[in-house]
Amino acid sequence: MKFITFLFVSFIFSNLLNPSAHAETGITVYAAEIGIGKFHRKDNSVHPYSNDHAWKPYILANNASLKTPQIIQNSDSTYTIFYSNLDELLASSRKLAIAKNAKIKNFNIHAHGLPGHMWFPRDKKAENSFGCENWRTSATAEDEENYNQYYGAVSKEEIIQIRNLSNQTGGVGIACVTGLKDWEELAPKYNFKSLLTNDAQIHFLSCVVGLGIMGESFTKGIANLLLSGDGARVQTSVNFGLGDWSMSEGMGFWDYQNDTQLKRDNNNYPKNRTDRQEMQKGSIRIAGFLNGIVTTGLISNRDFMFADERDPGTLSSAHWLETSSEIILPKSVAPKFIRIPGTKFKAKVSTQ
């Protein structure tokens, strides 16, 4: 009896020390906004991605139409959804989970980003609206055009505008983006929380989604909306993201450090077209449960954001001070227009 008791206590103790013992099984979903899928298609034609390349699942097939949604089963039993709007993405994810009788463990959303937002419409009505004219132009453009604009220089003024935008505390409206409010209104429609495992990892693979006050609010809000277990995490990037052929491991990071660095990068980048040459250490904002409360923190000095269950760090060890790229500038005023990182397009910004 003592021996059996010892084994039982040892089992409980080892499981407490090893949270992975309680890990759930589930499917991995890569979600690519249709324009991003076209970028990777062109990029892959110039520099072919290896089979284990992190961005391989986001390549739109050469013979694919632009009609969405498209649900693809990959060779490694993961799935890719090419989508045009948030409502379509959520509906397709639900359809996939039900069809496979499985919950989603890794949910990776890839699109162009802004602080607390991603650049795609919330639904079909928004997609067809005047405010989404630039997005429609980008989504339907020739692959070559999407590819060329990605490797454009970014001015210091545009970076400062994004930082100013990220630290707005009042109501801000941006044309043709989806933010926390859209997720809060549409996710319950599909009972989306129930589709995720208790230890789900949600990765927003986009520029600056986690930056500043708006980024912190979005990341924490998504965690409150969708997470259900202590091991679950939402991850966003505080920095600009890097994700071309040269970044086979995952999404890298870039940002303004000083004038000399920016001039050097802006001279080299459009010519060399290599993300890896510009990569820096970056910060990932994470949100999850800490002592039963959804909490956020920054994991700094990272090389990549991964699109799988690898956790960049624990909430208890996260940094709570903002990084240098999140300095709140004096008299921070929201710009009237903001350039969408990775594109030539600007979105209108309205304040309420």
Image (cartoon, helix red, strand yellow):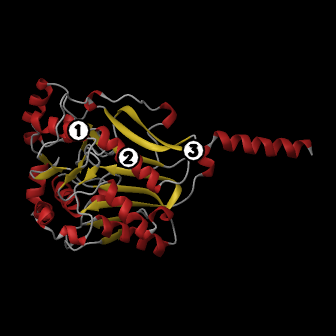
Instruction: Assess disc 1: are there few (<14), some (14-19) or many (≥20) residues with their C-alpha within 10 Å of its C-alpha.
Output: some
Instruction: Assess disc 3: are there few (<14), some (14-19) or many (≥20) residues with their C-alpha within 10 Å of its C-alpha.
Output: few
Which residue is disc 2 drawn over?
219
Report if the CB atoms under discs 2 and 3 are less than 8 Å apart.
no
Which residue is disc 1 drawn over?
276
Which residue is disc 3 drawn over?
292
Residue 19 lies left or right of residue 1; in this view the side is left
Q: What element carries label 3?
A: loop
Image mark for residue 182: none
Q: Which amino acid does label 1 sit on?
A: Arg
Instruction: Assess disc 2: are there few (<14), some (14-19) or many (≥20) residues with their C-alpha within 10 Å of its C-alpha.
Output: many
The alpha-carbon separation of the residues under discs 1 and 3 comes to 39 Å
Residue 307 position, x and y percent, is 38, 50
Work out whether residue 343 or residue 219 is closer to the camera in this orientation and state it.
219
Q: Which residue is drawn at 10% across and 35% down?
A: 157
User: Residue 86 appears in which quarter of the rendering?
Assistant: bottom left
Q: Which amino acid does label 3 sit on?
A: Gly
Q: Which amino acid does label 2 sit on?
A: Thr
- Tell which circle, 1 or 2, labels the residue nearer the N-terminal end: 2
Q: Given this view, does label 1 or label 2 mark the residue nearer the observer? A: 2
